[in-house]
Image (cartoon, rainbow, N blue to C red):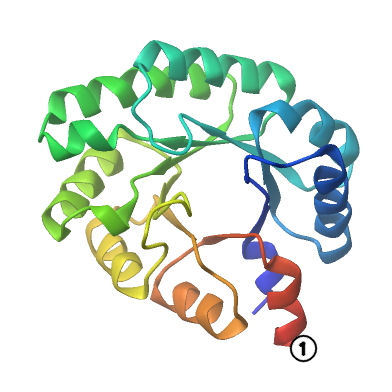
Amino acid sequence: MNLSSYIDHTVLKPTTVLADIEKLCKEAVEYHFAAVCVPPLYVKTARRLLEGTGVKVATVIGFPFGYSAIEAKVAETVLAIVDGADELDVVVNISAIKNADWQFVADEINTLLPVIRNSNKTVKIIIESGVLTEDEIIKCCGLYGASGVDFLKTSTGYAKEGASVKAVQLMRKHLPLHVKIKASGGIRTYAFAKELIEAGAGRLGCSAGVEIIRQAG
């Protein structure tokens, strides 16, 4: 298993500084990670540092709570694309899901997706599985699976519970095969990373990517 190709090497802490991004990008090239995932402020820098390396630049939209207005998420998305992002990790409106306002949830993705698709970018939808019921996760799989997103992502890493094998298995069971799963949040060991991939994850969001690869030997 080429574990490096599964990893989005990530730094999203609010205290992130330029030196963190430079280190992240250098490591991503060295270890051949799939992408870096950086705060919107640093997309331009990451794009410059990774030009020609094959490592993708991902950033987050509506992060970490997802309850910003649809129009705000559209503006964030447009700016991220202009700055050079290849992949957009979008936090959905968890409050709307908890209200069972599925029309709002549908309107949100149906507004965002054309903006992303028109620029041929990859979209990963973060549902924060650790705060959702199984029924809510299944409904998300149905809605986002039908909408045509590229990935459904388990977590932001900022909720009490991050990625879990159980959530990945549930999502894989209820998603179309063409929709991949990104597991994220609390992935710090090679053993756990391997479990998540075996459960159906096609990408891993990790701040501990280098340590995980070293553990793999």
Compared across the picture, whether 129 is left or right of 76 comes to left
The quadrant holding residue 43 is: top right
Residue occupying image coordinates x 40% and y 11% = 71
Task: Check the picture and name the quadrant holding the C terminus.
Answer: bottom right
Q: Amino acid at mark 1?
A: Gly
Find residue 136 and report its horizontal and vertical position in percent.
16, 49
Q: Residue furthest front?
A: 15
In this view of the protein, which residue sits in the foreground, 159 or 213? 159
Residue occupying image coordinates x 27% and y 38% = 94
Please name the residue that numbered disc 1 is placed on.
Answer: 217
Compared across the picture, whether 176 is left or right of 200 comes to left
The quadrant holding residue 14 is: top right
Find residue 135 and report its horizontal and vertical position in percent.
11, 55
Vertical position of residue 89 compared to residue 132: above or below: above
Residue occupying image coordinates x 39% and y 50% = 179
Find residue 3 and report its horizontal and vertical position in percent.
66, 73
